[in-house]
Image: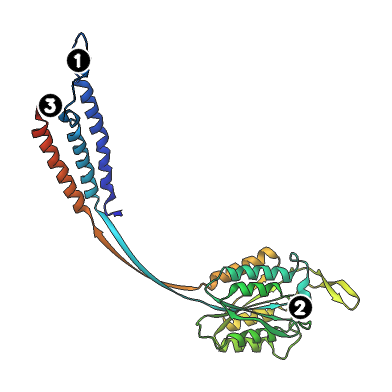
Amino acid sequence: MIFHSPAYLWLLLLLIPVIGWYIYKLHDQDASLQVSSTATLAKQPKTARLYMLHIPFVLRVLVITLLAFALARPQLSNRFSSESTEGIDIMMAIDISGTMLAEDFQPTRLEAAKKVATDFVIARPNDQIGLVVFAGESFTQCPLTTDHAALVNLFQSVRFGMIEDGTAIGLGLANAVNRMKDSATKSKVVILLTDGSNNRGEIDPITAAQIAKTYGIRVYCIGVGSHKPSRALIDTPMGKQYVTVEGEFDEQTLRDIAATTGGEYFRATDNSSLAKVYDEIDQLEKTKLRVREYSKRTEYFVPFLLAAFFCLLLEVILRYFVLRTITN
């Protein structure tokens, strides 16, 4: 229940001085009578009218209370709402080449990318999300799906060495575009994450970007890596060895891909900045929610007025007819 004019409820404060004055008058009107013994009086039964002495005042308090509630206009509100969501199709294309094992991210670039991307997936339950991985080649780890629990499990199995080493950015992007080009969803997005320059594959990155634009797919490119050289522990014919990974790579191509498709380019240099990049993409690509709400309010002040009138009538009857010999 709500009140249309709740300010009238302040009238209830009038009850404080009213009750205080009544108690004071009762004490002031006490009479005394000296007798030798009260034993005989104690045995006398109390009449029903004596028990009803304070009822008129209680009824007067109820009248004031009910009138205050009636003036505040109590209402009952019936709300009806309907909503519909329109999700976004998102393909993640993640570089799993050897340089993604660089340790300028904790514990490595690849593991940091998997962790942040997993959090991103969990936070978007209404979207279809898929995963493409690429190095020297590219393949689909998971097609578009709303089964995000299965997708998260597939993320955990992503590792270096699944496919031939190298960096085929164009091929990875083209594979992601191919997976979502026939989708009926209006909003389609690719999040392309890499730390290198295109050096493998039959498809040029800009050509892949133009294909994405044709299908109305926006590409957000994320370049990962600090600006200083770092080391990566990789498998070699002579066992695991550390190699040096340069901090700079072909950022201009990633900028061009983003500009061609209407997306944006971001540079992440550590775990914290990578998480902020995904947060920003999350804000840019909000799931559309349409809500229709209907509200119907019913007035309920009449019952309070009727109750106040009934209490006032009952008070008059008791005070001036039933209890007249006591109160006068």
The foreground one among 91 and 249 is: 91
The residue located at (18%, 47%) in the rendering is 307
- List the residue tagged with mark 1: 40
The residue located at (18%, 24%) in the rendering is 45
Label 1 CA crowd tier, 10 Å (few <14, some 14–19, many 20+): few
Write down the quadrant of residue 280 in the picture. Answer: bottom right
Disc 3 to disc 1, C-alpha distance:
22 Å
Disc 3 to disc 2, C-alpha distance:
101 Å
**Residue 157 spot, x, y in % from top left:** 71, 74
**Residue 9 spot, x, y in % from top left:** 27, 45
Label 3 CA crowd tier, 10 Å (few <14, some 14–19, many 20+): few
Q: What mark, if any, has residue 97 been given in the picture?
A: 2
Q: Secondary structure at mark 1?
A: helix
Amino acid, disc 1: Thr
Q: What mark, if any, has residue 142 been given in the picture?
A: none
Q: Secondary structure at mark 3?
A: helix
- List the residue tagged with mark 3: 326
Disc nearest the viewer among 1 and 2:
1
Q: Secondary structure at mark 2?
A: loop
Callout 1–callout 2 Cβ contact below 8 Å: no
The quarter of the picture where the C terminus appears is: top left
